[in-house]
Amino acid sequence: MLTLGSNLTLKGGELDLNSGATINGGTLHDKGGKFLWKGGTLNGVTLEGPLNMRNQASILNIGPNGLVLTGSDGRGPGVANLSRESELIFRGTQTFDDATINLSESNLTADSTGSGSVLTLGNKITVNVIARVGRIDGSSVVNNGEINVTSTMTSSGMVISSNTFTNQGTITVANGDSLYLLSPSFTNLAAGTLTGGAYEVDAGSTFTLENDDTVTTDDALIILSGVDSVIQTSLSQEVPIEATLTTIGSAGTLKLLAGRDWTSTLAMTNFGTLVLGGGTFAPGGLTNNGLISGNGVIDVAVANSGVIRATSGALDLTRSVTGSGRLKIGAGATLEVDRMAEKSLKATFKGAGGVLALGQAGKFNARIAGFAPGDAIDLLGQAATSATLQAGDKLVIMNGTQTIATLRLSGDYAGDSFAVASDGHGGTTITVSAGLLAQAMASMAPPVAHAAPLAPSWRPEPARLACPRAMMA
């Protein structure tokens, strides 16, 4: 055993840390030499410069007082590079933080000999799979940082097989890689509810939950981005999450990005957040008590008591919308409602350049608010010749002498004018222009605030009568 009071600088040659050897405390610095990790232990040591474990089957134990990795100058986060079946083993309960760990056919291991020991990967830890397969195993592991299974090399991935695994950070699987979560106890998933942490799977990549663990309720952050991004459970056969998930909880978010579709025979109830990014969302049914936002297609009838918001593109509701919730059109976005919308709903323009596109304007009964110059209501496939505001804020739309729709507005449109024009696709665009009084008021310069004059430093004496006042009789 070697106890360092200060620094040990290796300027040349090699230092072998063999099995049974321990360095306690102090700082190690590689300045031209080479550390060989052959089963020994660092305990409470700071290592300046990269921890390189690139020799075949290198093994390094970290004692319960931990390891600090820094840059070569002793500052900033450090790096550990593990390859060729190397293994970094953390003994006892400890936290490892502020570093990047690069794995290539290597293991990151929590102590499996100590009863109840826990390895916590801090919120400044990044674990990367660089090539082939990286493994996290041992006793109990808590991830508060980032685990990235994103190697660009073929046949790469990660296996997490610690006895207990808890994710409070972010796990990302991308570039066609695969992650297998084999831990007997995945504490985030209980009774079908996934709670806490973030899980992102990108195009062509797969995240597999073993041990018959199915996700029925999402109270975490789940991101599926791109075609063939898969989260699945391995039963007798692989079962995709679309075949099990029925609820987005109040603390949950499901993001379907980069054109990722969702097709299921199961109905979905949303109490949290559903974000669409260009794909088609088609569950067996949809009840929204939370927030649905983004762009794409919702190809199912919606019972909406929450908010549906179109942002950055077009969001198309192909079926009927019922309930007492809100429909919102973001700046420059289009909300398309192809079928009936119940009168208890409210549609609101939330920024300039929004478009409300109606497939059956005569069946759109929701009240419309925030309709302003720069916005448009598009009657899809319907010609119209006039739009006239009548009593009760009713916008009556006619084609010649035939009334084709009556839209209910909310707000003060007195004096405004409504224009109709072809939308260029066989339909009609309706716009609004502010009345003359409103335009005049808008063009007036705001009053200039003048500073109050300074009080003079003297005051004139009040006038004095030269003679006594006459008494009134």
Image (spheres, rainbow, N blue to C red):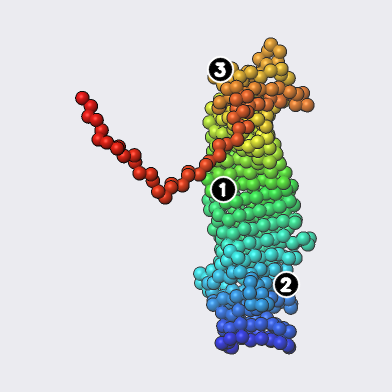
From this viewpoint, is residue 366 visible? no
- Mark 1: secondary structure: loop
Residue 193: horizontal and vertical position, in percent? 55, 50
Q: Label 1 amino acid?
A: Gly
- Helix or strand or loop: what does disc 2 sit on? strand
Q: Are marks 1 and 2 in contact (CB under 8 Å)?
A: no
The residue beneath circle 1 is: 252
Residue 259, picture quadrant: top right
Question: Residue 370, relative to residue 215: is it above or below?
Answer: above
Residue 38 appears left or right of 123 = right
Which residue is at a point 57% across and 51% down the rendered structure image?
220
- The disc at residue 83 is 2
Identify the residue position indicated by label 3 in the image: 391
* Above or below, comparing residue 144 to residue 392 in the picture: below
Tell me what residue is drawn at x 60 percent, y 32 percent.
444
Q: Which amino acid lies under the numbered mark 3 shown in the image of this protein?
A: Ala
Q: Position of residue 147 (x, y in %)?
A: 65, 62
Mark found first going from the N terminus, 1 or 2: 2
